[in-house]
Image (cartoon, rainbow, N blue to C red):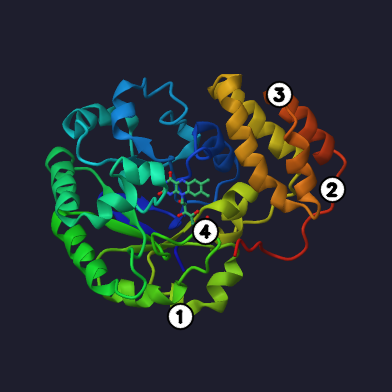
């Protein structure tokens, strides 16, 4: 399953994708994931269309891309009030494998901007934004969405959006199978994938709590109709996870070394004040590798700066803490 996915002029091999994650999938983290390989493309975190216009794209840790990363898909949040024409004039600087429009983020501050699920819910504005993107951009275009707002009545609205994506020339759709109001702890609805895939000619990329290859094997009927899968939080816990999904030989992982490598990469790409929050966020997930991982996360809480986080993290990691038993991790 998921050997290749062709989107326009680009073939992603394998069809395994790193999810866009704000605070996580900056240039340093993408570089770390690329050290292990096994994926077909990496998504940036959601970029503000307005802020991107102010950035030096080859220097910013949000947009910077190293050759080792391979294909990178740039995700944007937009409401339609931005100068999308200027954005797409500037875009060639990025060497984007595709542009993705965020239609699935339900965070209140994102909704307040009219991005994410707010844009998806407003059908006329959604159409207008997609048509404007297509008028200004002929490259590969994908979208990432949820199932909708209302668990009791969503299919019609979802089908209407699939038709729109097809009509305006979107080339693949990632579906995070939760509703807008559902937190990431709620069970994802993998059982909806066959219905979604049967109702569109677009390739569908599945996302939500896929943590181990056995998830796919045990739920073959749900995943088989998909064109690819996207991994989010589990790839922060285990930046090498794509190797397992791609069937590459396992590597011996030195967790302290991996943590420290990300520290080094992060400080290479951003000032320590900005790195601080990124290292905190990464360590929250990385701690889930360990039986007493909460001690790692608690240990870094007192740190005053990036060097303090490192000291506390390595104190825990270099003591060779017991790993969490079991094959995969569950977030639900
Ligand atoms: C810390 C964090 C930040 C996220 N930021 C984004 C984002 O910028 N854009 C987006 O489309 N989704 C974002 N998401 C959602 C993920 O892309 C993904 O849909 C979600 O985590 C479910 O997949 P998973 O179970 O594999 O983690 C974020 C999720 C997390 C945990």
In terms of sequence position, does the residue under pointer 2 or pointer 4 come before the other? 4
Residue at the location (13% across, 47% down)? 128
The residue identified by callout 3 is: 304
The residue identified by callout 4 is: 184
Residue at the location (58% across, 50% down)? 235
Q: Residues within 10 Å of mark 4 (few under 14, many from 20)?
A: few
Q: Nearer the viewer, mark 2 or mark 4?
A: 4
In terms of sequence position, does the residue under pointer 4 or pointer 1 come before the other? 4
- Provide residue 135's location: percent of width, then percent of height: 11, 42
Kind of element beneath mark 3: loop
In terms of sequence position, does the residue under pointer 1 or pointer 2 come before the other? 1
In terms of sequence position, does the residue under pointer 3 or pointer 4 come before the other? 4
Q: Nearer the viewer, mark 1 or mark 2?
A: 2
- Provide residue 83's location: percent of width, then percent of height: 19, 30
Kind of element beneath mark 2: loop
Q: Is residue 43 left or right of residue 306?
A: left
Q: Are marks 3 and 4 in contact (CB under 8 Å)?
A: no
Spatial separation of the CA atoms under disc 2 and disc 4: 27 Å
- Which dot marks residue 221? 1
């Amino acid at each position: 399953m998921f050997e290749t996915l062709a989107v326009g002029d680009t073939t992603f091999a394998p069809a395994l994708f790193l999810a866009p994650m704000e605070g996580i999938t900056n240039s340093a983290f993408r570089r770390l994931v690329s050290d292990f390989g096994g994926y077909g493309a990496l998504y940036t975190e959601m970029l503000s269309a307005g802020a991107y216009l102010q950035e030096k794209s080859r220097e910013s840790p949000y947009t910077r891309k190293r050759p080792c990363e391979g294909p990178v898909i740039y995700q944007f949040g937009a409401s339609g009030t931005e100068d999308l024409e200027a954005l797409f004039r500037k875009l060639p600087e990025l060497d984007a494998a595709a542009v993705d429009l965020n239609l699935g983020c339900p965070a209140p501050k994102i909704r307040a901007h009219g991005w994410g699920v707010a844009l998806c819910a407003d059908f006329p504005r959604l159409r207008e934004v997609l048509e404007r993107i297509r008028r200004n951009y002929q490259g590969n275009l994908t979208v990432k969405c949820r199932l909708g707002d209302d668990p009791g009545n969503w299919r019609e609205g979802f089908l209407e959006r699939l038709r729109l994506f097809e009509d305006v020339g979107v080339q693949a759709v990632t579906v995070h199978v939760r509703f807008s109001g559902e937190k990431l702890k709620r069970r994802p609805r993998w059982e909806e994938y066959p219905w979604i895939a049967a109702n569109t000619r677009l390739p569908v990329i599945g996302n939500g709590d896929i943590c181990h290859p056995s998830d796919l094997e045990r739920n073959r009927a749900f995943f088989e109709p998909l064109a690819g899968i996207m991994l989010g939080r589990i790839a922060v816990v285990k930046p090498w996870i794509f190797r397992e999904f791609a069937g590459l030989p396992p590597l011996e992982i030195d967790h302290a070394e991996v943590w420290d490598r990300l520290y080094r990469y992060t400080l290479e790409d951003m000032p320590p004040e900005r790195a601080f929050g990124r290292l905190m966020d990464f360590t929250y997930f990385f701690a889930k590798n360990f039986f007493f991982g909460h001690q790692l996360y608690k240990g870094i809480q007192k740190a005053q700066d990036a060097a303090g986080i490192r000291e506390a993290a390595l104190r825990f990691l270099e003591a060779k803490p017991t790993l969490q038993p079991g094959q995969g991790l569950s977030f639900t």
